[in-house]
Amino acid sequence: MTDIWGYPAGAGHTAGTDLAGYKVEATDGSIGKVDKHSDEVGSAWIVVDTGVWIFGKHVLLPAGVIASVDTTERKIHVSRTKEEIKNSPEFDKEKHLGNPDYHQQLGSYYEPHHK
């Protein structure tokens, strides 16, 4: 099973690389820019400032949804659609740190769907 809270092998991310400001692309278009990120083992994520796309909302994406990181273009491609990201559990930037229930809820939402 894929670790939803870890960067996928081959995604092109090196721990310690500052991803803040990178553009984030869903499978069907741009969703915003990285505001914050974490490389913490077992709890890696990016917070995306969606700007006007979802009325200034921020979303937290587990590192496991990242398909690739392009350091030359400063872009991150994620393996989810804009609709999936828009419908994700509400992000509360004050409460997400140290909140295992929120991380479990988000992890369950983004886990790969088995057919």
Image: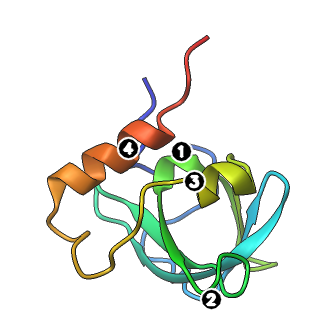
Figure quadrant of residue 25? bottom right
How far apart marks 2 and 3 lie (CA) works out to: 23 Å
Q: Nearer the viewer, mark 1 or mark 4?
A: 4
Give whichever of discs 3 and 1 has the lower sequence position.
1
Tell me the residue at 73%/57% (across/down): 82
First along the sequence among labels 4 and 3: 3
The C terminus lies in quadrant: top right
Amino acid, disc 3:
Asn
x then y, percent, for residue 81: 73, 50
**Residues at marks 3 and 1, CA–CA distance in whole angstroms:** 23 Å
Measure the alpha-carbon separation of dots 2 and 1.
21 Å
Nearer to us in this view, 109 or 112: 109
Which label's residue is closer to the chain start, 2 or 1? 1
Residue 27 vertical placement versus 23 (above, below): above
Number of the label disc, if any, that sits on residue 8: 1
Tell me, for residue 21, which label it has, or none: 2
- Residue 87, which numbered label? 3
Give the residue type that dot 2 points to: Gly
